[in-house]
Image: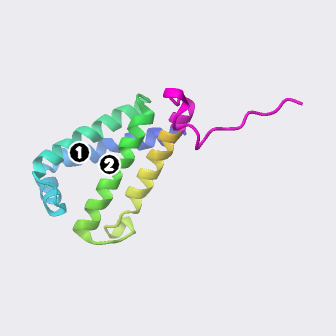
Amino acid sequence: MVVIRLVCGLFYFPHSISKIIGFAGSVGFFTRAGFYPPEFFVVLSIVMELICAVGLTFGVFTKYLGVVSAGLMVVAAYAMVVTRGPGWFWAQGGIEYLVFWGVASLAVALDAWNKNPGFFGLFAWPLKKAKPVAA
């Protein structure tokens, strides 16, 4: 699970850098996707992605940032469908990569939540392991 968490975090660095370097293109994409004002949403996505990158890479606030990362991928998949139409294969402008990244992020969050459920053990039940019975 550590490797999955690292991959989920590290993949955000080039993802964010591409938005920074190609800011004008990112604004155009966000405009076509219907996010107004697009500049605000590009900056917001860069900030959120960099927070996820650092947090997931270094294992900080993993249970929360895994959920945020999955949410970012849902929004990204929505934007892809709006701008390019429904498609699955990433190489053809589809959402398979985004879905995989989102599911992996959610798995990281669930694993972290199971290890440290927080208030009264809430949200740990999907992964809670039964304790072995001594004979």
Asked if the residues shown at circle 2 and circle 1 are in contact, with their CB atoms under 8 angstroms apart, the answer is yes
Q: Which mark is residue 114?
A: none
Q: Secondary structure at mark 1?
A: helix
- The magenta stretch spans residue 120: yes
- The magenta stretch spans residue 66: no
Q: Which residue is mark 1?
A: 45
Name the spot of residue 84 as percent of width and height, x first: 25, 70
Q: Is residue 35 left or right of residue 60?
A: left
Range of residues picked out in magenta: 111-135
Seen in the picture, residue 119 relative to 106 is either above or below; the reply is above
- Which residue is at a point 29% across and 61% down the rendered structure image? 78
Name the spot of residue 91 as percent of width and height, x first: 35, 67
Q: Is residue 9 left or right of residue 113?
A: left
- Which residue is at a point 60% across and 41% down the rendered structure image? 127
Q: Secondary structure at mark 2?
A: helix
Seen in the picture, residue 8 relative to 88 is either above or below; the reply is above
Q: Is residue 6 left or right of residue 42?
A: right
The chief SS type of the magenta part is loop
Which numbered disc, 2 or 1, marks the residue that appears first in the sequence?
Answer: 1
Seen in the picture, residue 133 relative to 40 is either above or below; the reply is above
Task: Choose top left, top right, bottom left or bottom right for residue 20.
Answer: top left
Give the residue type that dot 2 points to: Leu
Q: Nearer the viewer, residue 133 or 111?
A: 133
Q: Which residue is mark 2?
A: 72
Task: Choose top left, top right, bottom left or bottom right for residue 43.
Answer: top left
Q: Residue furthest right?
A: 135
Distance, label 2 to label 1, CA atoms, is 8 Å
Name the spot of residue 1 as percent of width and height, x first: 55, 39
- Which residue is at a point 54% across and 38% down the rendered structure image? 111
Give the residue type that dot 1 points to: Ser
Name the spot of residue 31 as percent of width and height, x first: 13, 59
Q: Nearer the viewer, residue 125 or 29?
A: 125
